[in-house]
Image (cartoon, rainbow, N blue to C red):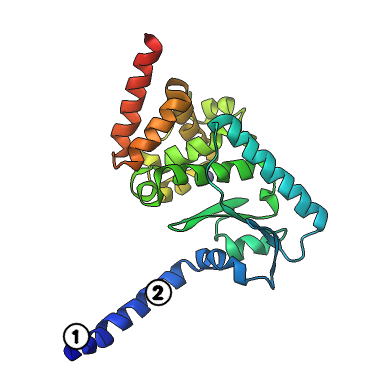
Amino acid sequence: MKRLLKISLTYLVPAIFIAILIYGLNFNHQIRCILVEYDLSSLRKETDNLYVSAGMDKIDAALLKENIEASRKRLSHFFDTVYANPVFLAGDSENFMRTYGAQLNSPGMNHITPIGSYIVLGPKGLNRDVISHELVHAELVYRVGWWNREMEIPTWFDEGLALMLDYRYKDSDAMWNILTKKGEEAPSLKELEKMKDFIRITQKSPYLSYVTSMREVSRWWNVVGLNGFAEFTDRIKNGEHFPSAYKETENKFSRMTKK
Ligand SMILES: [Zn+2]
């Protein structure tokens, strides 16, 4: 017993300490968000799920609350029911995204962690399109579960679905046709599976990554609809792999519409 304790103290405790240290160094933005409740010197708590930078104007904060509410309604109209209730952190300075978000040059982003989603909005992300986009990511992970989302959901599906409720690209077909020569030079879905490749292609043009993804997900959604989406997320939640869940749902619902 003593020997076991000695081995634990010699190897296990340092290993756990190193693991926590590595996680902290790599995921320091996530940790800041998770510990948001204890960061009230630089943030102001507006509601249970909304923290804004301490200096944010009261009217801007009120407008943001309205925009979050309107975005939730946008999702409710589309998904019928919205289950996810992520925590929002929002700031009106460029520095905010660097502190709580990521190094990406993005107006908003989502830390999807095993204990919940934390949406970070910078000054250009306080609007309904960016908020709706990030809420869709939170809704998808709520429905399929964190692990399944990490393991099964390709980036193109996650981003394509989010873009359907993000109207910044609603008139993007003409640009997509020009840039891809009517789809001939569009990236394949395989190339858009992993986030690092998705980002690389986005750097060439978001019309190539985001719009290619949205076109495919919209096509699929038009076949499966809300009931098909619910069945698809249940299949993933129950352990089915993405390619089969995606295709089988489409097959089943296209047969139903043909009847
Ligand atoms: Zn996104």
Judge by depth and name the residue closer to the eye, 171 or 184. 171
Image location of residue 39, percent across then percent down: 63, 71
Give the residue at x 70% y 54%: 123
One can see residue 183 in this view: no
Amino acid, disc 2: Ile
Image location of residue 129, percent across then percent down: 64, 40
Q: Quadrant of the N terminus?
A: bottom left
Amino acid, disc 1: Leu
Task: Report whether 46 appears left or right of 177.
Answer: right
Badge 1 is on which residue?
A: 4
Mark 1 C-beta to ligand 1 under 8 Å: no
Badge 2 is on which residue?
A: 20
Task: Report whether 6 appears left or right of 109.
Answer: left
Tell me: residue 161, above or below residue 142.
above
Per the image, label 1 sits on a secondary structure element best described as: helix
Q: Earlier in the sequence, mark 2 or mark 1?
A: 1
Image location of residue 19, percent across then percent down: 36, 74
Give the residue at x 62% y 40%: 72
Give the residue at x 43% y 57%: 114
Image location of residue 105, percent across then percent down: 59, 54
The CA span between labels 2 and 1 is 22 Å
Q: Quadrant of the C terminus?
A: top left
Residue count near mark 1 (Cα–Cα under 10 Å), binned few <14, some 14–19, many ≥20:
few
